Amino acid sequence: MHSITPLERLDATRFESPAILKKLAISSRRLAELKGIAGSIPNQEILINTLGLQEAKDSSEIENIVTTHDELFKDDVLPEAFANPAAKEVLRYRQALRVGFEQVRRNGLLTANHIIGIQAELERNHAGFRKLPGTALKDGGGQTVYTPRRNPPRSWP
């Protein structure tokens, strides 16, 4: 079986190729443009809500939670009138994105404790990080692409 090098042991110079550095410069420019345009929007929450809802909908489809924009907007405006479980799941995902966005906006960084709070918002529980051994992220071919540390620190920053 092919072994995967842990992230902390990767040679950073392998990512300093001309192709990657060119993409980095283009991405940086585009983010600066977006920041400038976003600053001209009177209510930036509109942009965040729209992008968050689209991201939540698309990401949920990966987990076979499929809904329409129409169902999302109906459930968002009148949650008691519509009981679409898929729409409710997507809206919880969007709310978790909002929580994370506000944490970064307020603190300027995202800590492990913030991630635990986001997870609690999404899952509606306080389970935190997985502690059971055997957790692994696999690709479509069944190959393990990431295995989390077996012994997380006792306290998170």
Image: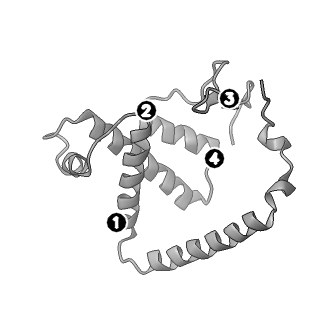
Q: Which residue is mark 1?
A: 46
The image quarter containing residue 43 is bottom left
- Residue at coordinates 28% horizontally, 42% vertically from top-left? 67
Of badges 4 and 3, the one in the foreground is: 3
N-terminal of the two: label 1 or label 4? 1
Query: Circle 2 is placed at which residue position?
Result: 123
Marks 1 and 3 sit apart, C-alpha to C-alpha, by 39 Å
Q: Nearer the viewer, mark 4 or mark 2?
A: 2
| Amino acid type shown at disc 4 | Thr
Q: Which residue is mark 3?
A: 144
First in sequence: mark 3 vs mark 2: 2
Q: Residue most toward the front?
A: 141
Distance from disc 4 to disc 2, alpha carbons, whole Å, reads 18 Å
Q: Is residue 75 above or below residue 150?
A: below
Which label belongs to residue 111?
4
Where 102 sits versus 41, above or below? Answer: above
User: Label 3, label 2: how many angstroms apart (C-alpha)?
Assistant: 25 Å
Instruction: Name the residue at 40% across, 59% down.
Output: 51
